[in-house]
Image: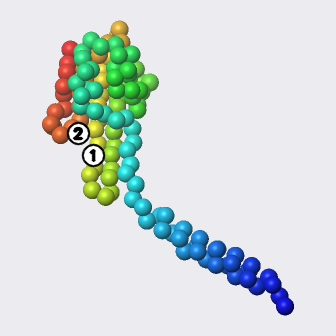
């Protein structure tokens, strides 16, 4: 009598179950948020004349630092929720003067439609 048959069928059943369940994990929709998290209340605290350190303490390190424009910092937030269909992109551009203080702050893509908040 061959007793290996039940062991093989259990292994085969396990492999089949895993093979059938594995594709279900690909059916999930993920909320994606990339870049900085730009909260309006934090941005409101950034004032003309603030130092680069103060700004980065409030809203974090910029996503983009351009070597050709060292006095410019760009913060970007990209959000996508496939379940609700909610999508948005926010961008904040901060220009610093030669002494490293905020000269101007521009906002793009926010609900209030503003493109320029604060200038020197």
Query: How many tags in the picture?
Result: 2
Disc 1 marks which residue? 88
Residue 71 shows in this picture: no
Vertical arrangement, residue 118 with respect to residue 75, above or below = above
In x, y percent, where is residue 36? 37, 35
Q: Residue at x 37, y 51 (%)?
A: 31
- Residues at marks 2 and 1, CA–CA distance in whole angstroms: 8 Å
Badge 2 or badge 1: first in the primary sequence: 1
Q: Residue furthest right?
A: 1
Secondary structure under badge 1?
strand
Q: Do tag 2 and tag 1 residues touch (Cβ < 8 Å)?
A: yes
Q: Quadrant of the N terminus?
A: bottom right
Q: Is residue 115 left or right of residue 73?
A: left
The percent position of residue 91, horizontal first and vertical second, equals: 29, 35
Q: Position of residue 84 (x, y in %)?
A: 27, 56
Q: Looking at the rendering, which quadrant does residue 33 occupy?
A: top left
Mark 1 packing: few (<14 Cα in 10 Å), some, or many (20+)? some
Instruction: Work out which residue is located at the far bottom of the displayed protein and give it.
Output: 1
| Front residue of 26 and 13 | 13
The answer to whether one can see residue 6 in this image is yes
The disc at residue 65 is none
**In the image, is residue 14 above or below residue 3?**
above
Of residue 101 and residue 40, the one placed in the foreground of this image is 40
Expressed as whole percent of the image width and height from the top left, the position of residue 115 reads 19, 32
Left or right placement of residue 44 versus residue 96 in this view: left
Q: Which residue is mark 2?
A: 109
| SS class, disc 2 | loop
Residue situated in front as seen by the camera: 113 or 21: 21
The foreground one among 92 and 37 is: 37
């Amino acid at each position: 009598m061959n007793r290996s048959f039940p062991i093989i069928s259990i292994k085969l059943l396990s492999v089949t179950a895993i093979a059938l369940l594995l594709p279900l994990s690909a059916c999930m929709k993920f909320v994606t948020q990339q870049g900085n998290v730009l909260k309006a209340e934090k941005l409101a605290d950034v004032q003309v004349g603030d130092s680069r350190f103060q700004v980065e303490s409030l809203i974090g390190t910029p996503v983009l630092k351009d070597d050709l424009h060292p006095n410019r910092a760009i913060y970007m937030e990209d959000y996508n929720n496939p379940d609700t269909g909610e999508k948005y992109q926010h961008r904040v551009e901060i220009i610093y003067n030669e002494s490293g203080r905020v000269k101007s702050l521009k906002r793009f893509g926010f609900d209030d439609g503003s493109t320029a908040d604060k200038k020197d």
